[in-house]
Image (cartoon, helix red, strand yellow):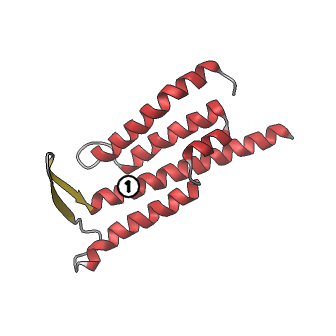
Amino acid sequence: MNSVILRTGTVYLRPLLLIFSVFLLLGGHNQPGGGFTGGLVAGLAFVLEALAFGLDQARRTLRVHPLTLVGCGLLLSAMSAFFSTLLGKPFMTGTWWVWHVPGWGELAVGTPFFFDLGVYFDVLGVTCLIIFSLLNAGEAEGKT
């Protein structure tokens, strides 16, 4: 697509969408959001990139193959789910670590965050894989 408006809008919207997706990811435990909605919003940023600048540019911007994101996300989610069994607790029991960070205070990180992060990568990877495949098929159909 050769639209100046879409290209200009994408340049400004892509970073905002990616920042908003991280906001949704981090706020997902206490508010609406989480890994699923954050991953969808991040996927939207790359869909806009593909529509505005072409599929090759969107793949270069993503920097990793979408299947790699899916695999890493599944591995991260599975590891966070099974971690509690290593500690003798039931499957998918949340485990938290609290660190005192000078100048910040206490920082608590737990397995639910890593599970959400895995879901984020899964949804981002699957969204990009589906859209990139559809756009690739559309480009191939248009060339014949």
Name the quarter where the N terminus is drawn: top right
- Residue 138 appears at what percent x and percent y? 74, 40
- Seen from the viewer's position, the closer of residues 107 and 90 is 107
Residue occupying the point 62% across, 37% down? 50
Name the quarter where the C terminus is drawn: top right
- Residue 57 appears at what percent x and percent y? 64, 39
The relative height of residue 37 versus residue 87 in the rendered view (above or below) is above
Residue occupying the point 16% across, 60% down? 98
Residue matched to label 1: 117
Residue occupying the point 84% across, 39% down? 143
- Residue 55 appears at what percent x and percent y? 66, 40
The relative height of residue 24 versus residue 108 in the rendered view (above or below) is above
- Residue 104 appears at what percent x and percent y? 15, 46
| Three-letter code for the amino acid on which mark 1 is drawn | Leu
Q: Given the current orientation, which residue lies at the most extreme top position?
A: 5
Query: What is the tally of numbered marks visible in this picture?
Result: 1
- Give left or right: position of 108 versus 53: left
Res. 99 image quadrant: bottom left
